[in-house]
Image (cartoon, helix red, strand yellow):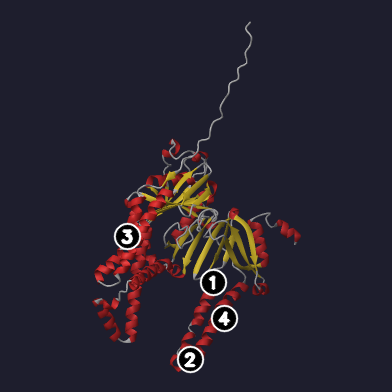
Amino acid sequence: MSPEVDAEVEVEAPTAVETPWRRLDVRMLVVGPLGSLGRLLPVVVILLITGQGDVTRLWIALAVAVLVVLAGVVRWRTTRYRITAERVELHSGWLNRQRRSVPRDRIRTVDLTAKLLHRAFGLSTVQVSSASKAVADASGQLSLDAVSKAEADLLRRELLDRSPASDAAPTSPAVAAGPPPAQELARLDWSWLRYAPLTFSSLAGIGAIGATAFNLVDDLGVDPRDIGAVDAAAERLGSAPVWLAVLVVVTVVLALAVVGALLLFAERWYDYRLTREPAGWGAGSGTLRVKRGLLTRRSLSVSEDRLRGAEIIEPLLLRAGRGAQCRALSSGLPGDAQGGALQPPAPRAEAHRVASVALREHPSQITEATLRRHPRAALTRRMTRALMPTAVLVAVAFVLGSVLPPVAWLGPWSLLLVPVAVFLGFDRYRNLGHELTARYLVSRQGSAVRQTVALQRTGVIGWTFRQSIFQRRSGLVTLEAVTAAGQGGYTVLDVAAQDAVALADAATPHLLTPFLLRA
């Protein structure tokens, strides 16, 4: 027999393949300079039409534009990003280098924004928002400005899908095959346009645009009175009676505000769609996606696994028109007036319906739940806080009227504030309420802006009890449910002290048990 020979076979361990770095789309080298030059157009137009202003400022602006173009080239050359199975990494900067990294399991929302110039070149900006505002920039966002439209949508699906297959490379067949069909939950109804003038954000936006235009004209040294039509109108208005001049100015301002609000509504919410995209490559609840915009196309995607509730917002004017707006409660959403908006201002019933389909709950279990009234002591507090400042204003008005005879009318007219204060105090109390349903804590408060919040009980991570000296005398407590979503905490105002403890203990069983036993 031949002798046995033991042969050792050396097996090499598999080497880890490093995820390659990517650059922003090369078309940004054109879009960036064009965007910078576009900001100079208002200056050039004013100078050409009026023939006024300091031409030196134009040359300074052009020199700044050249520097901005060069800075854009440097930014493109020094910016790179990559997406691994665990993190999203962004490296940028030349003189001031920045290294940003966001864990993928903390990503809450992905926002795609394509301005008009970006859309012309097939580009989009991707903003990744995480649960912690300390991991990216000051607003909690990591921004890729800009990538191709196809890659942006691929990144959105890849980052929000938390199934195991989502860790595959973006070019893998499972991802490249595309997502399952989306379910449409809501779309724009142009009859909702009537609610545009009833929202403060639209009116404030028009005011901001007007202020910007005025500052631009003023900086260029252009006097509107030197324009013939404006000067003639101002002269005729000055020769009219005071009451008529005031009426004309108020009418013109209101008309401009209404028209501007309508245009701003159309630009913001054109082609609005709310859809639910199912998890296409494994486990997961899917994604809520809001698409909207005329000139600037926006797409906000919120992972349903990270959705912690919904909020119905009703500003006073919008509430008077029986309108409302629904917003999502999730961490990582923008903090502006439109942050987390699932729909435009719409009929109140539509807002509650959108909250229902977004949370997959019957309206009676969330934002349309029957709420418990708060104690009568809460009404006393609402009235006291409304009437005391009013009484001070009325007293000051009468004192000024007695000291300055020309304004003696201030005292009697200030009495009109009293019924207004009474109405606001009673309305604030009437809007107070709370209820604990099977899965949600529902609370309502506010008069100038009424807010109805449906917060998942599993999303509550703590409770805060606050009691001022006046609340202590009335036996009331302000209870705050602490959460990582939305504003970080939602309050139940002026609830009886014993009811506040019972509510918190029932909403999150066993969380307060150790403290109750010690008490």
Badge 3: few (under 14), some or many (20 or more) residues near its Cα, within 10 Å? few
Badge 2: few (under 14), some or many (20 or more) residues near its Cα, within 10 Å? some
Cα–Cα span, label 1 and label 2: 32 Å
Cα–Cα span, label 4 and label 3: 52 Å
Residue flagged by tag 1: what amino acid is it?
Arg
Residue that numbered label 3 is attached to: 38
User: Tag 4, which secondary structure?
Assistant: helix
Residue shown at 48% from the left, 40% from the top: 19
User: Tag 1, which secondary structure?
Assistant: helix
Who is closer to the viewer here, 260 or 365? Answer: 260
Q: Nearer the viewer, mark 4 or mark 2?
A: 2
Q: Nearer the viewer, mark 1 or mark 2?
A: 2
Residue that numbered label 2 is attached to: 401
Residue 273, image x, y percentages: 40, 53
Residue flagged by tag 4: what amino acid is it?
Met
Which badge, 3 or 2, is on the more N-terminal residue? Answer: 3
Residue 448, image x, y percentages: 49, 71
Residue 148, image x, y percentages: 38, 47
Residue flagged by tag 3: what amino acid is it?
Gly
Q: Nearer the viewer, mark 3 or mark 2?
A: 3
Residue shown at 48% from the left, 88% from the top: 411
Residue that numbered label 1 is attached to: 428
| Disc on res. 388 | 4
Cα–Cα span, label 3 and label 2: 54 Å
Whether residue 146 is situated above or below residue 491 in the rendered picture:
above
Cα–Cα span, label 4 and label 1: 15 Å
Whether residue 389 is situated above or below residue 151 in the rendered picture:
below
Badge 4: few (under 14), some or many (20 or more) residues near its Cα, within 10 Å? few
